[in-house]
Amino acid sequence: MIDAVGNHEGSETLHAEAAELLPGGVSSNFRLGGPSVPLFFERAEGSHLYDVDGNRYVDYVLGMGPALLGHAPADATAAVAETLARGQLFAGQHRAEIELARLVVELVPSAELVRFGLAGSEMVQLAFRLARAATGRPTIVKFEGHYHGWYDTALVSTAPTLDEDESRALGEPSAPHLPSMGQSVAALADVDVLPWNDLDELGAYLDRHGESTAALIMEPILCNTCVILPRPGYLEGVRELCDRHGVLLVFDEVISGFRVAGGGAQELLGVLPDLTVLAKSMGGGFPVAALAGRREVMELAGDGRVLHGGTYNTNVVSTVAALAVLRKLRADGPTIYGDLARRGTRLMEGLSEVAAERGVPLHVQGLGAVFNTCFGVDDVQSYRDYRHADADRQRALLRALIDRGVRVTTRGTWFLSAAHTDADIEQTLEAAADAFGAL
């Protein structure tokens, strides 16, 4: 049964009040530009959100991905509650961080040592610093459409235009596109941008610039752009090229880590990086991130040659929450990931079917645990393919779904949780069928 959404008057009132105190009335720019006024929520439980106007939503945003076990997962909240009276910050070590590190090393195939922080953005910066220290080289290569955080050294060409410099030779970097006013151009002096999923481009680049390249960073599954999987053999080819040229391979698994498999995309796809950035799903909604990787590289931070700090790193709340989440995934992983794949695949196939029945050119791609919907394209293998999608129709669909009690990310990415039920999926498909009719 469709959860028809009433008005958003409460959210509108609160947003107007917030705008007097917060720029844009929000605390993250990614909460702007959605299909309606920025919504204000009262609570979240399992697969559902409840806003201040009493509306209930089947939630596929999941806090932008972290709530892999659903909102307010019992294991994590109980673990956190048990610690609160014993303190949150010691400016020192505690047992739980050892246990959490041990679990990360056990679950993530490439992990030998681990450092913890609070956000993926900051751990990307540590990866850059370690790669430059380990290789003695300056340049970091990133790829079009890949998002690695909002810091100046990484926020480049996340959404570049399709204008191509016709004079660019094969394997030469693209002109960087800066998404934000106020970014430091100087900070990007050591960052080059290439198209992704193209071994010829990368091979030609490293033949010319390999001696100055410290690392390549990529999402092994491009979740920030249409959930694009690498072409067959691409990651294997990247690994070989990095080994040949002495370049470190960094996987940004902020989204894919612990979501697409217990060991992330590297387990699913069978290619191991030198360094891995982890966040989101490992905390179950609590702020925590990690950089894991080869011992000889990570030890550069351990002996003080590479500086990494943070007052709130391994705070007790985040650490015990993440420990509870990873223990749950270790114990029940086959069931959890099997259900995510089954229900997600049912939802993907169902969306395609109901769209086709109504003559709507919907494209669905990705994995059961995380997938994307868009319009006007048939086969998306790169960021440039995705830029041909019909963004206006996408926004119209997302607004129609919100009005029918289904919440999806503004870029059309759908996250599944272990808390989603078969009934949620059927309710979503009923709402989608009605939304497609409205389109």
Image: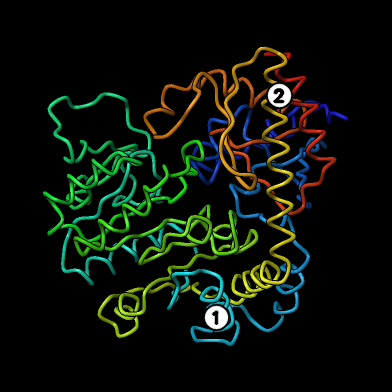
> Residue 325, position in %: x, y?
67, 67
Q: Residues within 10 Å of mark 1 (few under 14, many from 20)?
A: some
Q: Nearer the viewer, mark 1 or mark 2?
A: 2
Residue at horizontal 53 percent and vertical 78 percent from the top: 101
Picture quadrant where residue 57 is located: top right
> Residue 134, position in %: x, y?
23, 72
Picture quadrant where residue 6 is located: top right
> Residue 352, position in %: x, y?
66, 26
In the rendered image, the vertical position of residue 173 relative to residue 220, given as above or below = above
Local secondary structure at mark 2: helix
Decide which of 22, 182 is in the foreground and name it: 182
What amino acid is at disc 1?
Answer: Arg
Disc tally is: 2
Q: Residues within 10 Å of mark 2 (few under 14, many from 20)?
A: some
Residue at horizontal 39 percent and vertical 44 percent from the top: 146
- Here the colouring is rainbow
Picture quadrant where residue 79 is located: bottom right
Q: What residue is disc 2 on?
A: 353
Decide which of 189, 335 is in the foreground and name it: 335
Outermost residue, front side = 233
What amino acid is at disc 2?
Answer: Glu
Residue at horizontal 68 percent and vertical 48 percent from the top: 341
- Check residue 102 in the rendering and tell me which mark sits there, or answer none: 1
Question: In the rendered view, does 273 fall on the left or right side of 102?
Answer: left
Residue at horizontal 43 percent and vertical 51 percent from the top: 220
> Residue 434, position in %: x, y?
77, 19
Q: CA distance from mark 1 to mark 2?
A: 44 Å
In the rendered image, the vertical position of residue 366 relative to residue 96, given as above or below = above
Outermost residue, right side = 1
Local secondary structure at mark 1: helix
